[in-house]
Amino acid sequence: MQVLTSNAPPDDHKMLVELAATVALTPAYNKAIFDEVIPKPERPKQRTIVFIVCGTNKVSLRDMAKFHEVVEKHVGPWEVWIEGKAINVE
C-alpha cells in the first residue's frame, strides 16, 4: 500500500520519499485509512493534520521502479489492520 502512496509526494511536491517514510503519508492519500486514524468529530468541523516526514537519501528512482513492479502484481483491494480493526481499501 505504501508503495502506491510513494507516487504521491513526487507528483504533488516534486520530492522522492523513501518507502518507509510513506507509511506516515498513507492516510493523507487514502480516505478510509484517514477516517479510521483521525475519526470525524461529532460536530461538523474540518479536521487538520500535520505530517512530518524526515528527509533521506536512501532511495532512487530505480528502487522505486522495482517496488512498483512488485506491487503491480498484487493490486488490491487490501485488508489493512489498524488497532485491531480490519479495513478494506483499494
Image (cartoon, helix red, strand yellow):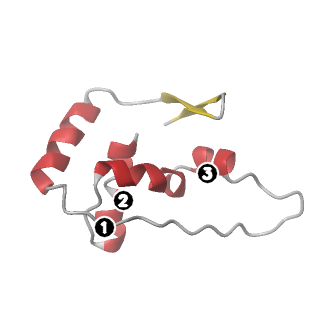
Separation of marks 3 and 1 at Cα, in angstroms: 23 Å
Q: Residues within 10 Å of mark 3 (few under 14, many from 20)?
A: some
> Disc 2 designates what residue?
8
> Disc 3 designates what residue?
34
Number of the front mark, 3 or 1:
1
Q: How many marks?
A: 3
Question: In the image, what residue type sits under mark 2?
Answer: Ala
Farthest residue, direction right:
43
Please, what secondary structure does the residue beneath circle 1 have? loop
Left or right position of 4 against 70: right
Residue at 80% from the left image edge and 68% from the top image edge: 45
Separation of marks 1 and 2 at Cα, in angstroms: 15 Å
Please, what secondary structure does the residue beneath circle 3 have? helix
Number of the front mark, 1 or 2:
1
Q: Which mark is residue 55?
A: 1
Residue 63 percent coordinates (x, y): 15, 47
Left or right position of 26 against 35: left
Q: Earlier in the sequence, mark 1 or mark 2?
A: 2
Residue 67 picture quarter: top left
Question: In the image, what residue type sits under mark 3?
Answer: Phe
Q: Is residue 25 above or below residue 88?
A: below
Q: Which mark is residue 78?
A: none
